Amino acid sequence: MPEQRLSPSVCDWRDGGRRVDVIGRSVFVHESGVSEIPIVLIHGFPGSSHDWAGLVPHLRGRLIAMDLPGYGFSDKSAAASYSLFEQADVVEALLAALGVERCIIVAHDMGDTVTAELAARANAGRLGFAIDQIVLTNGSIFIDLARLTRGQRLTLRLPGRALPFPMPGPVLRRSLMESFTATAPPPSGAIEDLVAMIRHGRGDRLLPRLIRYIQERRVHQPAWTAGLVDFAGPLTLIWGEEDPIAVPAMTRRLVSLRPSTSLVMLPGVGHWPAIEAPEELGAQVRAALGLPPAPAPRAAPIP
């Protein structure tokens, strides 16, 4: 089956980025803007850095979005390991290669857990850069509360190795559709862009291997919870209220364990705030970071 055709939005995103070789992995990174302390954007499963494309215009400063190995335009080797610990290693090595000594992290889905591992390293004095602040969006920070889609459950039942054939398109689309809010359709083109980035470089065949992060999450839940609870800097949760997977109960549990955590709920938004409501998410991220509001758009000239 040929790869999904890339939309103009995805092509523009690809053309605006580059690949950086770190610890034996070729990692796609998209950078924009300038500031002393960059904002690092870490995507989730089965997404990519392109998930943040709609959010970028609503932020300011230096923004760094990467495709973790196995995702998007980064390496997708059938023989590689995709442990969350190794994903955190890649983030750490990439930021070192980019000269980043301190940053703010905004994460989504699986990226929340990669961030929890980075926070745990920072708490122990073992991280190569400083994290000034963390913003987490919808992700299974408490995997025991997660409500996996039928597609996710099916993929987890497959052997944990690359498929010898493409993942059926209807299975991919149906599982992705189930992760958006049931009260509104996904934004135009969102599903096809997600599918295209998954299929790029035969990444759809890797899904049974990549999704093993859920099992890893179950094993290391206490350590990663402690990573977030013990993080010394500001921590904000910005959560789609209608997420069918990473349900709002997760946010309430973290706030009960870490009362200083800030919580913002986004009504009418499902699992993908950066795709479903990028302007609203951007406004809330800016508020959490103490950045000024985005300038109002210019009125169209009167003909």
Image (cartoon, rainbow, N blue to C red):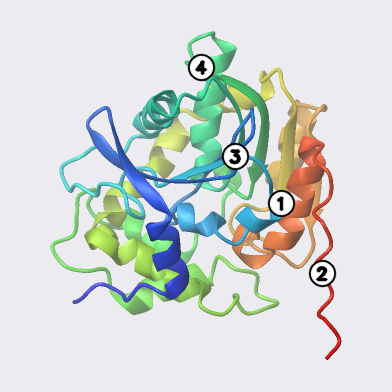
Q: Which residue lies at the image location 72% right of the left edge and 34% below the top edge?
A: 254
What residue does disc 4 label? 121
Mark 2 surroundings within 10 Å by alpha-carbon count, few (fewer than 14), some (14 through 19), many (20 or more): few
Q: Which residue is mark 1?
A: 239
Which structural element holds mark 1?
strand
Q: Amino acid at mark 2?
A: Arg
Q: Quadrant of residue 212?
A: top left
Whether the residues at callouts 3 and 1 have beta carbons within 8 Å, the answer is no
What residue would you read off at disc 3? Answer: 62
- Mark whose residue sits in front, 2 or 1: 2
Q: CA distance from mark 1 to mark 4?
A: 25 Å
Work out which quarter of the rendered image holds the C terminus and state it: bottom right
Give the number of the mark in front: 3 or 4: 3
Q: Quadrant of residue 82?
A: top left
Residue at image mark 2: 298
Mark 3 surroundings: few (<14), some (14-19) or many (≥20) residues within 10 A: some
Q: Residue furthest bottom?
A: 303
